[in-house]
Amino acid sequence: MKTQPIVPAHIDFGAAPDHLPRAPDFGDVYHPQVGALAQARHVFLGGNRLPQRWAGRSRFVILETGFGLGNNFLATWDAWRADPARCQRLHFVSIERHPPTREDLARAHAGSALPELAAELVHAWPPLTPNLHTLEFEDGRVQLLLALGDVAALLPGLRVQADAFFLDGFAPACNAEMWQPRVLAALGRKAARGATLATWSVAREVREGLATAGFELQRAAGIGGKREITIGQWAPRFVPRHLPDAAVAAREAVVVGAGLAGAAVAAALARQGLAVTVLERHAGAAGEASGNLAGIFHGTVNAADGPYARLYRAAALQAQRDHGTALARGAVAGCVGGLLRLDLRPEGLPGMHALLRRAGLPAGYVQALSAEAASQRAGARIPAPAWHYPGGGWLSPPQWVVQALAEPGVRFVPRVDVASLARTAAGWALHDRQGRLVATAPLVVLAHTASAAGLLAGLGLPRWPLHHTRGQVTYWAGDAGGPLRLPVAGDGYALPLPDGGVLCGATRQDELAEAVGVDATVRSTDHELNLERLLRLTGLPAPPDPARWLGRVGWRLHADDRLPIVGALPRAELDARAQRRDQARLLPRESGLFVLTALGARGLTLAPLLARLVAAQATGSPWPLEQDLADAIDPARWLVRSARAAAGEPRIQAPAGG
């Protein structure tokens, strides 16, 4: 999906105290004189029979067209809070083409009747980048999935089944694109059984479009001088055909592997209410690549803004939120204080500025800095212009893993080496190398790097094209207030440790999969390679005494396209004549079997978002990624490529992110 830069809302707040916030570009106001919260409660909550309809449910999903200033969300959150019979989890999905800046959002809610909730929303407000942002409140029990962009472009790619629709936005006469028939028709394809809708509009073209989409409509009393509103229930004559759904009705799950991927997905499933057991073959968590002393996370910029750039941007913003929360709890070392990534393109700084103008990416996500400005931020000599990611930083992976495994509902079991997997009537049975049954569960997530591929081969699933690279990091202790102020990446990376030391690396040597775990010896030649790159990146020399140089070896796992492998596993037996294979989203799935692996060197960046994707797929919650991005990282993508190649379609290679 081609993304467009986000243009923030132009809001006229006026000078008079009773002036209504107005959108001059649309010639309309954000809410009537009676007040935004009064309209939200009467039209959208009352029109959808809320809070009564969510009573006692484990999950309730609302889809809104037109987030505006967020008053409908705040009113819904407030009603959820006040309701003793509330649903366990509230998912509020809202689409907005022109969101307010953080400053304008704060101004709009300066006198809010819900000051505590409004302040939390303003604090969580993301940089205004395209596509999806997951904001979590109430310890994750209330989730706001913001979809920033054009509703007609975004709506088809959302994986959501809504229980209620809030159709807001400026009047059809002022904003016809939001109310066009194809947008209204798409709503029916996002409706769960028994879904309801409400909108203040009674325009004929709106009602006709909704009726065509399968909604039975009624008129109800309006508010604030508006005589009538529209309410409705989804009752289609023909139920639209939905894509295959991998969700399972499970209360328990088993995750294999306790590295970054396994810990992240275990925590994500536990936050969805599942009891999760994590099996790990080592004596402790983070025993392999996730055991490095420290690692970096950041986004990427790419001129084409293709799948790589969009995926890593969404992941980096989620990582910033998650890692910031972990650091605030005080149990994890690290810093979400910015990261520099060198850019050696021939066009230099002017080319970087031109790329930013075309992409429309905000300074809250990325900035282009001269070598001099980058050096000043880093406290070291940076030899070239650099991208500055304000939400990037560094973190201790093993400490983060331990904290994730401490999520309520997660049980960690070490020294269990899962060697085989078998289908059962109740789900899946896992056995160790002696053939002993070690666990059963209706839901299993394989997150243990290369070993996952071996288990799946036993089920008849084809092996993925995987590659290992051996990586060694170099680090040393220092004095407090060391020379490096923030992480620097490019050809390798360097980051400041809390004691004033530096960690740098990492080497990249291809290794055979069979050799993994055989040679973990720290090599002096690898130390020298790391230190040469450190000098090129930052101008910083290593301590002259090699006895101070410490190191650690780990193996990264990559797919051939350098994208992670995430999601529900395709069914092993497919009818070649009846089953289309040219799109991953069309393939039927093994019930209750998921994978999260091949994160390469970007585990700290990718794990928080992709763990949420697996949890959403497994439970039927709204996906935090659009369908086309989920397709790009789908475990079935090689089946799709083979089918397309057999049909003579050219293969399109997505560009790597920078």
Image: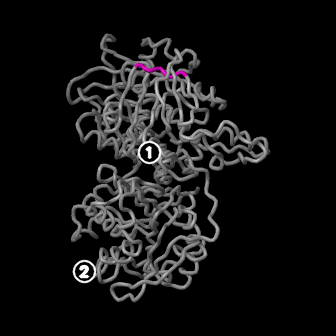
Q: Is residue 522 visible?
A: yes
Foreground residue among 221 and 225: 221
User: In the rendered view, would you say 553 is above or below 126?
Assistant: above
Which residues are drawn in magenta?
Answer: 415-419
Tell me the residue that label 2 is attached to: 15
Examine the image and state in which quarter residue 523 appears: top left
Of all residues shown, which one is farthest toward the front? Answer: 425
Foreground residue among 275 and 8: 275
- Name the magenta segment's main secondary structure: loop
Foreground residue among 177 and 543: 177
Inspect the image, locate mark 2, and give the three-letter code of the amino acid beneath it: Ala
Point out the frontmost of discs 1 and 2.
1
**Where does residue 238 sit, x and y in percent of width and height?**
64, 68
> Tag 2's secondary structure?
loop
Asked whether, in this view, residue 656 is left or right of residue 506, the answer is right
Foreground residue among 422 and 78: 422
Tell me the residue that label 1 is attached to: 612
